[in-house]
Image (spheres, grey):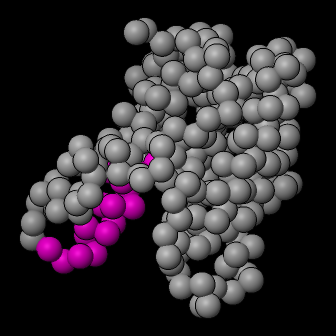
Amino acid sequence: MDIRLNAKSALITGGSTGLGLAMAKRFAASGADVVIAARRPDVLERAREEIAAGSKSRVLAIPADVTGPDSLRALFAETERSLGKVDIVVNNAGASSTGAFETLSDEVWMQDFDLKLFSAIRLSRLAWPGMKARRWGRIINVLNVGAKAPDPGGAPTHVTRAAGMALTKVLAGEGAPHNILVNALCTGLIVSDQWVRRYKSSGTDTPFREWLKGKAGGIPLGRFGEAEEFANLACFLASDAASYITGTAINVDGGKSPVV
């Protein structure tokens, strides 16, 4: 299936590395104009060059701290000025933060909610009026499988991701009359910069891919996923090919989650 996003504009947070970068590359290659946002300007610019090299789309990199309401408003305004509209929002900001419940301070909880939940709330709210007016919109919330099946020691991430899943369902119901489709993708174990850092800090002499295979126990497919596999599904959900899919949270985890 040839998925096309021609004449669409996408804004992807956490777009400089990992899943965000993979989605930006896939969207741009499929014809969408893309803005990627993250905090580090140098990493963002390298990502922008990489994305632009593989497509003829407009690709912009805008540094932003999505935990700040003012920064988000500035990000959205600059995206609209540059691309004219925002058809697709991918809320992808946030790294894993976990610990024993009794050790987690209010500050840790609030930082996680600001990064993962409130950034999605605020950015979706900014995009909503334009999507309603054009009667076309896509919002994709990147969560993880802990949103459905939280583990002991999984707070605060699994709690904020579960809230993100509830937000997805609420927005899907309110957006449906306006052709705004809202879905979530729940990640499992996917090769990323985070896993590369863990590998380097492990001190092992085992080759990276072999080391990863040793971490893949319990995954029915027997391996980690690739960011490109995740991006393919995100591109489908962002397209007209997925015009009857909304309000769902899809596991991208090789079958590992006990909850469908």
Answer with left or right where residue 149 lies relative to residue 68. Answer: left
Image x and y of residue 34, in percent: 61, 28
Q: From the viewer's perspective, is residue 150 above or below residue 236?
A: below
- Residue 162 placement: quadrant: bottom right
Seen at 31% across and 69% down, the residue is 198
Locate residue 64, reporting x and y percent.
70, 52
> Magenta span has 211?
no
The answer to whether residue 75 of the structure is visible from this angle is no
Question: Can residue 131 be seen at all in this image of the molecule?
Answer: yes
Number of dots carrying numbers:
0
Q: Which residues are magenta?
A: 187-204
Q: Residue at x 17, y 56 (%)?
A: 213
| Closer-to-camera residue (48/136) | 136
Which residue is at 26% across, 58% downward?
218
Q: Give the camera-side residue of 120 and 146.
A: 146
In the image, residue 242 sits, relative to residue 203, either above or below, namely: above
The x and y percentages for residue 108 are 67, 79
Residue placed furthest toward the bottom:
102
Q: Position of residue 67 (x, y in %)?
A: 74, 60
Residue 231: image quadrant is top left
Q: Residue at x 67, y 22 (%)?
A: 9
The answer to whether 229 appears left or right of 138 in the picture is left
Residue 191 colored in magenta in the image: yes
Position of the N terminus, as image quadrant, is top left
